[in-house]
């Protein structure tokens, strides 16, 4: 089991969509990130990586590679922390599915191109152990054994 931290942010720089993007992921039981390719239909992870590499090549678009590399390493059984933007409301998710690419409605409307099935539980109002105070990356692994144990305890206590 690995422990992750993710921002459930929309694909585009329209920050008015952050709350709706967050709710979209929680309500649909997914963990997701953007970096869409403006094309619908299924894509394999390998095809996405090639196409995104071409699409996002150039200055100012290197964040897609960092996010993709971390997101592709998530596995079913991993745990993932997130928080509602602007407030201290933390959620812990259990990754339940493999990577998928979707860029049709309503995923495109929410700015979520890449997703995995995820069961979310409300984790509380205080920043969890190991949760970074300031993190620029969309997705990052929390490498802290005590934080992993505490996240597992939170999951066991709050799961349905």
Image: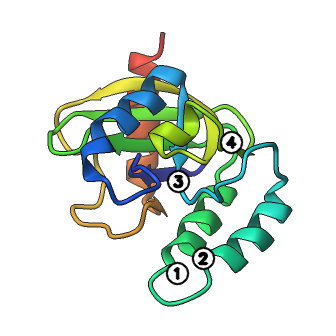
Identity of the residue drawn at 66% across and 74% down = 55
Q: Is residue 69 left or right of residue 7?
A: right
> Which callout, 3 or 4, points at the residue further toward the start of the chain?
3
Of the residues tagged 2 and 1, which is closer to the observer? 2
Graded by Cα atoms within 10 Å as few (under 14), some (14 to 19) or many (20 or more), the crowding at tag 4 reads: many
Q: How far apart are marks 1 and 4 (CA)?
A: 21 Å
> Which callout, 2 or 4, points at the residue further toward the start of the chain?
2
Q: Are marks 2 and 1 in contact (CB under 8 Å)?
A: yes
Along the line of sight, the residue nearer the viewer: 72 or 159: 72
Q: Residue 15 carries which label?
A: none
Residue designated by label 4: 102
Q: Position of residue 157 (x, y in %)?
A: 39, 19
**What secondary structure is marked by label 1?**
loop
Work out which residue is located at the far top of the displayed protein and give it: 160
> Which callout, 3 or 1, points at the residue further toward the start of the chain?
3
Q: Is residue 125 above or below residue 62?
A: above
Q: In this view, does 54 lie to the left or right of 25?
A: right
Q: Where is residue 89 in the image (x, y as percent from the top left)?
A: 22, 33
Q: Where is residue 96 in the image (x, y as percent from the top left)?
A: 67, 31
In terms of image quadrants, where is residue 51?
bottom right
Residue designated by label 2: 56
> Which callout, 2 or 1, points at the residue further toward the start of the chain?
2
Residue designated by label 1: 62
Graded by Cα atoms within 10 Å as few (under 14), some (14 to 19) or many (20 or more), the crowding at tag 2 reads: some
Residue designated by label 3: 34
Identity of the residue drawn at 75% across and 41% down = 98
Q: Distance between the residues labelled 3 and 4?
A: 10 Å
Graded by Cα atoms within 10 Å as few (under 14), some (14 to 19) or many (20 or more), the crowding at tag 1 reads: few
Q: How far apart are marks 2 and 4 (CA)?
A: 17 Å
**What secondary structure is marked by label 3?**
loop
């Amino acid at each position: 089991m690995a422990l992750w931290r993710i921002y459930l942010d929309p694909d585009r720089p329209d920050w008015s969509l952050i709350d709706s993007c967050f709710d979209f992921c929680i309500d649909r039981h997914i963990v997701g990130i953007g970096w869409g390719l403006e094309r619908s239909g299924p894509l394999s992870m390998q095809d996405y990586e090639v196409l995104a590499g071409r699409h996002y090549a150039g200055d100012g678009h290197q964040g897609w590679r960092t996010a993709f590399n971390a997101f592709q390493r998530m596995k079913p059984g991993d745990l993932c922390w997130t928080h509602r933007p602007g407030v201290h409301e933390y959620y812990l998710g259990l990754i339940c599915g493999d990577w998928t690419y979707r860029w049709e409605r309503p995923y495109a409307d929410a700015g979520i191109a890449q997703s995995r099935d995820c069961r979310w539980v409300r984790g509380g109002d205080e920043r969890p152990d190991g949760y970074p105070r300031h993190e620029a990356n969309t997705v990052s692994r929390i490498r802290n054994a005590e934080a992993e144990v505490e996240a597992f305890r939170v999951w066991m206590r709050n799961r349905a």
